Amino acid sequence: MEALIPVINKLQDVFNTVGADIIQLPQIVVVGTQSSGKSSVLESLVGRDILPRGTGIVTRRPLILQLVHIDPEDRRKTSEENDSKKNGRLYKGIDGEEWGKFLHTKNKIYTDFEEIRQEIETETERITGNNKGICDEPIHLKIFSPHVVNLTLVDLPGITKVPVGDQPKDIEIQIRELILKFIANPNSIILAVTAANTDMATSEALKVAREVDPDGRRTLAVVTKLDLMDAGTDAMDVLMGRVIPVKLGIIGVVNRSQLDINQKKSVADSIRDEYAFLQKRYPSLANRNGTKYLARTLNRLLMHHIRDCLPELKTRINVLAAQYQSLLNSYGEPVEDKSATLLQLITKFAAEYCNTIEGTAKYIETAELCGGARICYIFHETFGRTLESVDPLGGLTTIDVLTAIRNATGPRPALFVPEVSFELLVKRQIKRLEEPSLRCVELVHEEMQRIIQHCSNYSTQELLRFPKLHDAIVEVVTSLLRRRLPVTNDMVHNLVAIELAYINTKHPDFADAIGLMNNNLDDQRRNRLRDLPPSVPRDKAAASGSQSTPASDQIDGGMGNWRSMIRKGEENLSGDRVVPQPPPPTASPQRGHAVNLLDVPVPVSRKLSAREQRDCEVIERLIKSYFLIVRKNIQDSVPKAVMHFLVNHVKDSLQSELVGQLYKTVLLNDLLTESEDMAQRRNEAADMLKALQKASQVIAEIRETHLW
């Protein structure tokens, strides 16, 4: 069991080599207010003066302190500490039996602990400056000594409330966030330090510990300065847990005073005086308090905590190893055969681009529609609904219809509605279908452009290694899409122009609509005859509806012609529409002044006559019927044209286009130049993977030696 802590230290060393804290290792985090005695507790555990001293905030960076117990008889350095196996040297001795090492100074050995303290101060000021600010970047220090137990401790800045000097105004918040960052680690043990001469109920250390450990399962309380309590008082109730119970226990210690430190009183002498004080003031609790008991308790708690954390730690390491292996694979190996690599990347991109359109891509987007699915949505939802929202009679007013009819008749009053007015008006409405059709082409073109980025981000991550190749591929595909856009637009223009070129009034669907309207008008005529008063002969009334029909205008039966439908209209319908009417002349022309007969009078509103109402209704029904036929044709033919001239053409020619423009010997070196940081990221991923694999081996050794 005792060997578990060195194993954790070994894991810490492994991850320190790659500068990563992705694994939360078991450790003891020391928390307390300023001047609560945190530093003195740590120095008592080490047995040496190693921490900076002073007034105000002294600890301004986290100090991760690893205590490593060594056998005094073993004067060899392990291969994990000085790579002796690598260089074949044996550690032949150090001036003294204790020494220290910093991570940032590599393999430099410190045997003078005063030098260690100065190095901590120097390294702290190097990062945080000399303005009493703090930093969350830790300092790593390992102490090797036969007088320590195996522990991993983290010393943090003391909790403060009010900034002093030129400290930041939010220093309290900064320190609090730094403390929470470390104690929130579920694999950590919280060592909450509180001075005995303060009220335990107001302990900031216990308060912040309970925020992340409300059950107290990983919190141990330490009461310092037992010798500084007011006369006539003691800490018996506090140490017995009667004031604030703590599950892992409460341990009291006696620190060195500032006078003792100034007089160079050794830690060993201080521990002897502490033992004497506890025997005198707390004889019944002396064997469960003091620095030595604290060290043994921390060692025991840490070992049990490590044992409990190892299964989850092993799982976490294996998961991360798989993730970094995948990441390293995505970075690829250094290119050897550039020609083959270039052709492979081009072919893979072209295949993924086409697969994204077909819906067979390896990486399926789940957040939004993309590729072929979005193109389908554009055709049948966006474009289809837009066409359906176009009103067949939109933009046409009654005066527009009447004006078209009159302009088509010329100088003679017409007996029938001229066919040319229908064609004129229906073409105007059909022209309105062109704009949404061109917008459909534009939307599909934009989606084809988006597919490029989709393939770059998800499907062909190898392209990220070669930014110049990526840019070149994007340029080639974009150019191809740009060339196909006007061709597709021209085809859509032609589709609408085809409909405008010939108004087929013999279209089967249009003829059916005319026949239906003829039947409706026949019914209306019969109803009119039925409603005539008895004084009007029905044969004359019936003849009045057809007396003006010349024999030469008799029309084909069956489907009929729209003119025959018009002739069957009612003459005596009471109209209710109103249209502008020319007002009477405002004055007689005066002598000497010419009268402009071409002046258009200002129209005023009037009701439509029965015939005008009939003509407008007939024309509107014909326009609507024919417009719906054309809209159906456009809704079907535009997607087909876009697929043929844009989508399918790009799919079929993409591979040859890329190969033809990029697969050239003169471009190989330039296109396959890696990004500046790609090699660095590959090395970092490889180092992290190596560290994770080594950590996995360390945990496997624990199982083999039955330590776990």
Image (cartoon, rainbow, N blue to C red):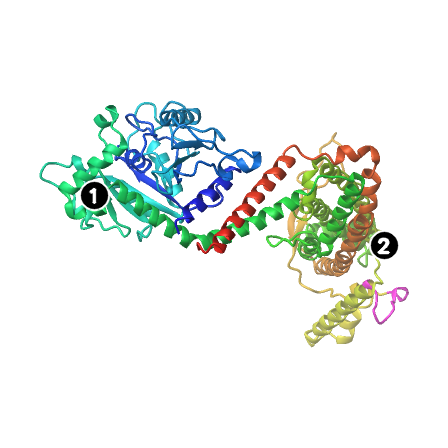
Which residue is more in the foreground, 707 or 580? 707
Q: Position of residue 700 (x, y in %)?
A: 51, 53
Q: Which residues are magenta?
A: 550-562
Could you say which quadrant of the image residue 686 lies in? top right
Pointer 1: residues within 10 angstroms few (<14), some, or many (20+)? Answer: some
Residue 200, above or below 164: below
The residue located at (42%, 26%) in the rendering is 123
Find disc 1 in the rendering and name its residue.
200
Closer to the camera in the image, 428 or 364: 364
Which amino acid, by three-letter code, is at mark 1? Met
User: Badge 2 local density, few (<14 within 10 Å), some, or many (20+)?
Assistant: few
At label 2, which amino acid type do we have?
Answer: Tyr
Observer-nearest of 192 and 668: 192
**Image position, residue 397 (x, y; %):** 68, 51
* Main SS, magenta residues: loop
Assess whether residue 433 is covered by the magenta stretch.
no
Which residue is found at the position 38% from the left and 43% from the top? 150
SS category of the residue bearing label 1: helix
Residue 509 is left or right of residue 93, and the answer is right
Does dot 2 land on a helix, a strand or a loop?
loop
Residue 232 in view: yes
- Quarter holding the C terminus is bottom left
Residue bearing the label numbered 2 = 502
